[in-house]
Image (tube, rainbow, N blue to C red):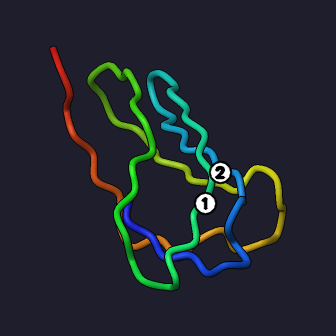
Amino acid sequence: MRYAAGPSSAGVVYTVTMKGQTVGMTKGIVESTGNLYKTLPTGDMQLDAGAYMLFIQPANKAGQTAMSLEKVILRRIGE
């Protein structure tokens, strides 16, 4: 995931959820990037083939901007 986050967003817990035929979820903690975009890993999910919706949501600070998301990179791992 590539995002920027200022110091006030450091420590915000977020969840990454894929909803579709099956659900995978990972949790992460926002790291301050000094307002520069950086690529940081979010974890692995096991998903079957199909169409999914990706949700990235702050979990512990409702209403607070957790990050400025630039892009999400999905990679196939293993077989």
| Amino acid type of the residue that numbered disc 2 sits on in the rendered structure | Tyr
Q: Is residue 11 above or below residue 74?
A: below
For label 1, the SS is: loop
Spot occupied by residue 64 in the image (x, y as percentages of width and height): 78, 72
Residue extending furthest bottom? 35
Please report the residue visible at 47 percent of the width from the left and 47 percent of the height from the top.
54
Residue position marked by numbered label 2 in the rendering: 14
Please report the residue visible at 55 percent of the width from the left and 50 percent of the height from the top.
55
Q: Which mark is residue 30?
A: 1
Please report the residue visible at 59 percent of the width from the left and 46 percent of the height from the top.
28
Q: Nearer the viewer, residue 50 or 17?
A: 17
For label 2, the SS is: strand
Name the image quarter holding the C terminus. top left
Name the image quarter holding the N terminus. bottom left
User: Mark 2–mark 1 contact, CB under 8 Å?
Assistant: yes
Q: Is residue 36 above or below residue 64?
A: below
